[in-house]
């Protein structure tokens, strides 16, 4: 094994939904809204919606990305208004003073990097009371605008989003271009963590532990970050570690980036089958995650 000495962390990227907060009821409502959109706006048979959501998520990163890649005409603003606009945010989210204190105590530039739209991100951050903790929110709109300018929104991949590596490249650029090795990345999705880890980001899986995916640290809750990474608050380098071979999220061995055909991290067949069935996968990636990350 190769022994690595990583540089000091210079910037932090945080996912939003299911990472900075966790609310299962809100996840279910978003999932329901997506299913209604597909049936009402796009004419999908109701008994096919769940399977299609899983298929698009597993192959394109989000349900929205899969729909557009398959030629469905989706107005992005209308999609986000339908999926998020009707949410009773005040019912689901409340201020989190402990999270605010933790983020304020972290003496590094902090950014939110989310597949969600900017309006949704603002509502969530405002209600959590942590908007001022972040220099910038890198949302769906910001990533898509940068991708269009760079000529990346081509046929077959019209929506650039996590876990697509190009989305990470854009996020790093919008965050001031820190080197990947000097960037902390926290997300609840094993696929998104896999992409970040393969790019060299110090990657922290939030919400689950014991998951067989490439990552530097796994924690149950974002509030555990200071205890898990005390060196981050002390301005020190990450501990010296041995670098194991990269592997699939199910531990079956290394794979090339973009094996799924659209630049996203490969998904194990076991996970795909479970998601399509609407049940839990071996890494607890449920149907809820499959449709929720579309927004």
Image: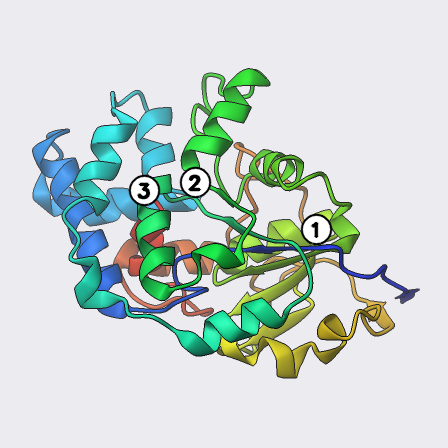
Residue 221: where, in percent of width, then height?
A: 48, 76
Q: Contact, CB < 8 Å: mark 1 with mark 2?
A: no
**Badge 3: residue crowd in 10 Å (few <14, some 14–19, many ≥20):** some
Residue 288: where, in percent of width, then height?
A: 29, 59
Q: Is residue 207 visible?
A: no
Q: Residue at x 48, y 63 (%)?
A: 188
The residue under label 3 is 119
Q: Residue at x 27, y 58 (%)?
A: 277
Provide the secondary structure element on which disc 2 rests: helix
How many marks can you see? 3
Identify the mark nearer the N-term, 3 or 1.
3
- The span from disc 3 to disc 1 (Cα, nearest Å) is 30 Å
Identify the mark nearer the N-term, 2 or 3.
2
Q: Going by the image, does 1 lie left or right of 202?
A: right
Image quadrant assignment for residue 146: top right
Nearer to us in this view, 225 or 41: 225
Label 1 vs label 2, nearer the camera: 1
Nearer to us in this view, 252 or 35: 35
**Badge 1: residue crowd in 10 Å (few <14, some 14–19, many ≥20):** some
Query: What is the residue that sits farthest to the bottom in this orientation?
Result: 227
Residue 185: where, in percent of width, then height?
A: 62, 57
Query: Residue 59: which disc?
Result: 2
Identify the mark nearer the N-term, 1 or 2.
2
User: In this picture, is 181 found above or below 264?
Assistant: below
Label 2 vs label 3, nearer the camera: 3
Label 3 vs label 1, nearer the camera: 3
Q: How is the image coloured?
A: rainbow
Provide the secondary structure element on which disc 1 rests: helix
Q: Residue at x 51, y 19 (%)?
A: 148
The residue under label 1 is 198
């Amino acid at each position: 094994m190769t022994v690595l000495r990583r540089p000091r962390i210079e910037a932090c990227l945080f996912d939003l939904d299911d990472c900075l907060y966790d609310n299962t009821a809100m996840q279910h409502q978003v999932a329901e809204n997506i299913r209604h959109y597909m049936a009402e706006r796009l004419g999908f048979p109701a008994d096919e919606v769940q399977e299609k959501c899983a298929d698009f998520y597993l192959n394109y990163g989000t349900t929205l990305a899969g729909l557009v890649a398959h030629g469905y005409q989706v107005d992005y603003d209308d999609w986000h208004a339908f999926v998020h606009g009707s949410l009773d945010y005040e019912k689901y989210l409340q201020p989190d003073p402990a999270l605010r204190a933790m983020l304020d105590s972290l003496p590094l530039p902090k950014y939110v990097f989310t597949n969600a739209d900017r309006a949704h991100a603002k509502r969530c951050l405002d209600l959590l009371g942590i908007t001022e903790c972040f220099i910038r929110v890198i949302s769906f709109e910001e990533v898509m605008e940068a991708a269009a300018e760079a000529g990346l929104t081509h046929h077959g991949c019209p929506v650039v989003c996590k876990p697509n590596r190009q989305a990470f490249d854009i996020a790093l650029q919008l965050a001031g271009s820190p080197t990947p090795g000097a960037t902390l990345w926290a997300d609840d999705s094993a696929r998104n963590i896999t992409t970040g880890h393969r790019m060299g980001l110090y990657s922290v899986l939030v919400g689950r532990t014991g998951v067989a995916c490439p990552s530097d640290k796994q924690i149950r809750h974002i509030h555990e970050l200071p205890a898990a990474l005390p060196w981050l608050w002390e301005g020190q380098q990450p501990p010296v570690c041995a670098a194991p071979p990269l592997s699939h999220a199910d531990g079956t061995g290394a794979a090339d980036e973009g094996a799924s055909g659209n630049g996203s991290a490969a998904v194990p067949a076991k996970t795909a089958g479970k998601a399509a069935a609407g049940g839990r996968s071996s890494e607890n990636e449920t149907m809820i995650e499959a449709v929720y990350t579309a927004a």
